[in-house]
Image (cartoon, rainbow, N blue to C red):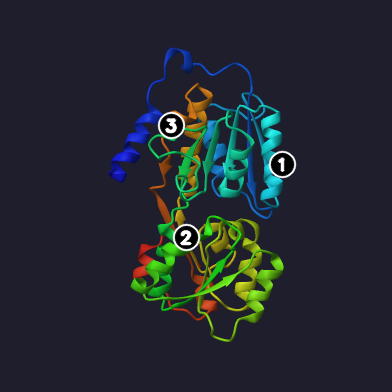
Amino acid sequence: MNRRAFVTGLGAVLAAPLGVEAQQISSKVARIGLFHVGLDHEPPALASLRDSLKRLGYEDGKTIQLDYRNQPDEQAARATARAFARNNVDLILAFEDQAVRAAQLATSKIPVVFAHIADPVAAGYVMSLARPGTNLTGVADNLLSLHDKRVQILAELQLRRVLVLIDPTDPTTLPRLADLTNAAPQIGVWLVERNATTEADLRGVFAALGKSEVESLVIISSSLSTKFPELILRLSLERRIPLASHRKALVEKGALFSYGPNYAAVGQDVAAYIDRILRGTKAAELPVQQASRFEFVINLKTAKALRLTIPPSLLLRADQVIE
C-alpha cells in the first residue's frame, strides 16, 4: 500500500463522523492507565499528549483520570499492567515495547494504545497495520529505518567507526541490528558491536574501549535507550564519543544530534486514538499509523567541544541548531 495514501486514509478514519451511539462521551470519568519503562525520563510524546487531550475537551481529574506510572524495568511494568487490568481501567496507554508487551500479557479485552515502537506486526501486537484485529492499536513512530538515517548522518560527519550498543535480552534488538548491518556497507561505516544489559555492563563497555577504537555511538536496543539514556550520554561525553540520539532532550543535554519522529505530532496522533476509543470505536477497527513527520536537531556547542566541523549542508537540513 502506498504510504502516503495509507496515512491519508488513516486521517480520514480518525476524523470520520461517529455513529449516534458513539458521539456522546459517557458522563462517567474515563480512567486511563499510562506507563513506561525508564525512571530518569518521561516518554517523549507525553507532554504533547496531555495538551492534545485538553484541546479535545478532556480535563484530567474531571472528565478523565490519567494514572501515569514510570517503571524501572519490564518486570515492574508487568505488575503495573496487571494492576490496570484488575482495576478495569477504560484504556491502557503503553509507551515503548517493554510496556506494550506487559499490557498485551495483562489483558485481551481492555483497549491498548501504543506509541514509541518500531514494528507492531513483527512484534505480534497486531495482525496488520491496516487491520489490527486485536485490542491493540496506535502509532509506530520508532521506525527501523531511522537507525540507518542516524548512521548516514554520522558518515557525513566522517565518523565512520560506530559503536553500537546492544542488549541481547531485548527482543527488539535483532531486527534493528540486522537492518543496520545490511545497510552499513552501502553507507560506508564500520560497526563495533558491544553487548550490555545492566549499568555495570555499560560501564565495562566504555572502560574497555581502546583509544580511537570508535568515533561515534548509536543505541540499538529499546531497553538501553529507555533505562539508561542519561548514563550512556554521560559515559559518551567522558570518552568524547559523539552520540547520535533519537530524541531532542538528549541533544539539549549534550548529545551531538538527534534524528527521530516529531514527538509533538505523535502525541497529537495518540490523543486522537484515545478520543475515538472513548467515544466507542473498537481498537481493532483503528489502523496503526506510522510516523510521517521527523525532526533533526544538532548541538553545535557539543560539536565545537569535540572539535567537529558540521558541514553547511547538514546545518541547512537541521530543524534546530543548539548553540
Q: Point out residue 238 in the picture as x, y percentages from the top left corner.
A: 64, 76
Q: Earlier in the sequence, mark 1 or mark 2?
A: 1
Distance in Å between CA atoms under marks 2 and 3: 26 Å
Q: Earlier in the sequence, mark 2 or mark 3?
A: 2
Closer to the camera, 323 or 242?
242
Cβ–Cβ under 8 Å for marks 1 and 3: no
Q: Residue furthest bottom?
A: 211
Q: Residue at x 41, y 20 (%)?
A: 18
Q: Point out residue 194 in the picture as x, y percentages from the top left corner.
A: 57, 72
Mark 3 lies on a secondary structure that is loop
Distance in Å between CA atoms under marks 1 and 3: 27 Å
Residue at the spot of label 2: 176
The answer to whether residue 149 is above or below residue 287 is below
Give, as a three-letter code, the residue at label 1: Ala
| Mark 3 nearby-residue class (10 Å; few <14, some 14–19, many ≥20) | many
Cβ–Cβ under 8 Å for marks 2 and 3: no
Give, as a three-letter code, the residue at label 3: Leu
Q: Is residue 207 left or right of residue 242?
A: right
Work out whether residue 270 can be spotted: yes
The answer to whether residue 192 is above or below residue 212 is above
Q: Residue at x 56, y 48 (%)?
A: 96
Residue at the spot of label 3: 286
Number of marks in picture: 3
Q: Residue at x 44, y 35 (%)?
A: 132
